[in-house]
Amino acid sequence: MKKVMFVCLGNICRSPMAEFVMKSLTDDFYIESRATSNWEHGNPIHEGTQKALRDHAIAYDLGKTSLQISDKDFAIFDYIIGMDASNVADLKKMAPNKYQDKIYQFMDKSVPDPWYTGDFEETYRLVQIGCKHWLERLEVENG
Ligand code: 4NP
């Protein structure tokens, strides 16, 4: 089973949202999420992301806490997907050369960070669109 990782700055707002939306869409891939930073290490999913997921009846794991991406993750995961352009730039700096090709951007447009915008609903809308596109792509590339 291919392994897919969503990555944002804090791993409390956008990437856990993408993780649980994607898990609601498919059981065909192994899915997790991480942070580029260690700023929120050990903290739970942001209440705004939890509310957006609840409002849209997407199941999530209360035990999910922020975790920074590690060298082992770069080796193990097949698709490492940054939620915005700066996440992708940071991932490219962090990843060993041989794993650069595993790094992708979630969508052309950066997914706005609700930590700053406060708009979890707009982020949810984009995460839904992006996850559906990613699922199609993953199925084409791995079907
Ligand atoms: P996320 O949002 O990257 O979507 O999880 C953020 C969460 C925390 C911080 C920044 C962005 N922070 O500065 O702690």
Image (spheres, rainbow, N blue to C red):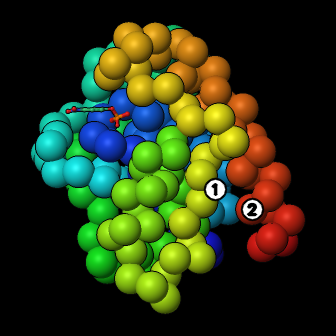
Mark 2 surroundings: few (<14), some (14-19) or many (≥20) residues within 10 A: some
Q: Quadrant of residue 47?
A: top left
The residue type indicated by label 2 comes to: Leu
**Can residue 4 be seen from the camera position used here?**
no
Dot 1 or dot 2, earlier in sequence: 1
Q: Position of residue 95 (x, y in %)?
A: 39, 74
The residue under the point 59% across, 52% down is: 105
The residue type indicated by label 1 comes to: Asp
74 left or right, relative to 27: left
User: Is label 1 in a helix, a strand or a loop?
Assistant: loop
Q: Position of residue 37 (x, y in %)?
A: 23, 51
Mark 1 surroundings: few (<14), some (14-19) or many (≥20) residues within 10 A: few
54 left or right, relative to 101: left
> Of residues 122 and 89, which is closer to you in this image?
89
User: Is label 2 in a helix, a strand or a loop?
Assistant: helix
44 left or right, relative to 122: left
User: Regarding ligand 1, which quadrant of the image does it lie in?
Assistant: top left
Classify the position of the N terminus by image quarter: bottom right
The residue under the point 40% across, 20% down is: 114
Count of numbered marks: 2
2 left or right, relative to 53: right
The residue under the point 72% across, 32% down is: 129
Q: Quadrant of residue 16?
A: top left
Q: Quadrant of residue 49?
A: top left
From the image, tell me which residue sits under label 2: 138
**Can residue 69 be seen from the camera position used here?**
yes
From the viewer's perspective, is residue 101 above or below residue 30?
A: below
From the viewer's perspective, is residue 106 above or below residue 116?
A: below
What is the number of the mark on residue 27?
A: 1
